[in-house]
Image: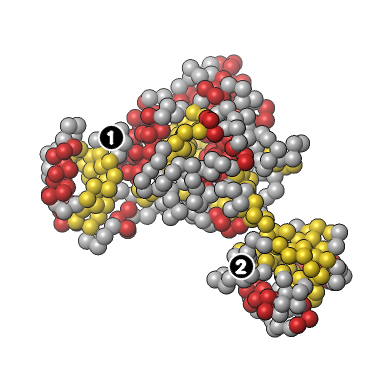
Amino acid sequence: MSQCKPSLSSIASAVSLMIATVAVGVMGNATAAPDTTRVIVAFKAGSAAEVKAKVHAAKGAIKHEIHGMNAMAIEVPLVALNGLRHNPNIEYIEEDVIRRPFATSSASTGTPYALGQSVPYGVKMVQADLLPDTYVANRKVCIIDSGIDRAHADFVGSTANMTGQYDSGTGNWYTDENSHGTHVAGTIAAVNNSNGVVGVNPNARVKLHIVKVFSAAGWAYSSTLASAANQCAAAGANIISMSLGGAASSTTESNAFASLQSKGILNIAAAGNDGNTVVSYPAGYSSVMMVGAVDEFKQWATFSQYNSKVEIAGPGVAVLSTVPTNTGSESVLKVGTTTYVPGVITGSPKTLATAALADFGLGDRTTTTVSGKVCLVARGTVDFATKVMNCQNSGGVGAVIYNNVAGAFSGTMGTTVAAIASVTATSTDGALMKNQLGQSATVGVKAISHASFDGTSMATPHVSAVAALVWSYFPTCTGAQIRTSLIKSVIDLGAVGRDVKYGYGLVQAKAAYDRIRAYGCGV
């Protein structure tokens, strides 16, 4: 459902997590018991009790009652479907399709900020630095995702403006087991303090309502999403931000979002991360604004799905934002007085070690010569896990594997669990370290609370946050009018006019504000 791919030179693959998955339509029935199916049943007003009785009589189970709609998700024996379809109180039955987050992982450091923070490149790219969030307290953004780490240092001072609701299936809204929701929220509202990063609306004013549909498993049903969207509306949301999706459409979802749009709400969702022409939903509904992703050079992100439904683009490659406290990771490497920029070995434990640097050759055998030392290891011959474990079994306290060809690289421990930390280095840095043998070296992985992700999941909160920022200056505009004003004030990218990769172009906060001020809402 989410559309982001974490990427963080310092974040650990923690995020393949969840979300690192692309939005693919998985059949909701995949998790149903054998010979049963999970479907959505829409029924006539006033007939809920009778329909429930029919479901129970058919040996079915009610799995979810959709908030704000005459519909419910049920699991029922396949043989009972025909009988239910012919019930005069039932308007339609459709599959309860699955929704996933849209995100993956990459690497970025952000731009140093004067107060010790980083200003992610996307903040300036969408002109958020040119339009103060003075009035944004009059807007509420509802984030449907995996929850949020409310205690994160980058949300200090803003929690008074956060609301949400407990769900028996996914738990408390202020917890986040897979990082996706916290990352999305940080792009929208990370606070301008001396910590971490800043969001598009950085002054703890924008209101957030969190509806948690993803647990650690990282997927949800379309019935859950329809319910969540209606809960957003009930909470007074102006904007619904959805970094998620799936390949199959749903009548129930479509009806829900059309109804919300008619009430003045702006629905925004991610295009998907499969890099193909498939239309993802809910982004594909006409009542929802579909968001594609670009990189910091305003170039189309190759993972971003492209089709005629793409409406607008936002920064979505190597986006630095918040993740649950200390769940991210950052590789560290210093030898003598030289600080290097190491690469990641996925699966390395979060620990640091300082000791003399020692040559460990190819690391293809054990030796007592590196006992109590940091192993400097050449890439090649055996896999990374073997090199690290040979260092550990030789008494080494940490490992640095340098490249045997030009350029940086990353590695993985696979299923091997080591007690010592390991990082990678370029061939150039490896050659320099060969001349530093015997000097004190610090190597390892430290826990951090920020990470860089890739995905249309990351582009979506940029657009949602800009919509809130611009709309806050003109609160009498409708969601549909803000949508129009945003697309008429973009930076046109790709082919002239609307195209399948960029939509109308890159979202721009100040340009949209100027346009509305000059011409009025939606003109």
CA gap between label 2 and label 1 equals 47 Å
Tell me the crowding category of disc 2: few under 14, some 14 to 19, or many 20 or more residues within 10 angstroms, Cα based.
some
- Which callout, 2 or 1, points at the residue further toward the start of the chain? 1
User: What residue did someone put label 1 on?
Assistant: 69
Amino acid type, label 2: Thr
Looking at the picture, how far across and down is residue 301, in whole percent?
58, 48
Residue 64 falls in image quadrant:
top left
Residue type pointed to by label 1:
Met
Q: Quarter-wise, where is residue 398 in the image? A: bottom right
In the rendered view, tell whether residue 356 sits above or below residue 264.
below
Residue 57 shown left or right of residue 22 in the figure? left
Residue where numbered disc 2 is placed: 412
Q: Which residue sits at x=41%, y=24%?
A: 264
Q: Is residue 400 above or below residue 30?
A: below
Q: Residue at x 14, y 52 (%)?
A: 58
The disc label shown at residue 115, or none: none
User: In the image, what residue occupies the spot 53% across and 49% down?
Assistant: 179
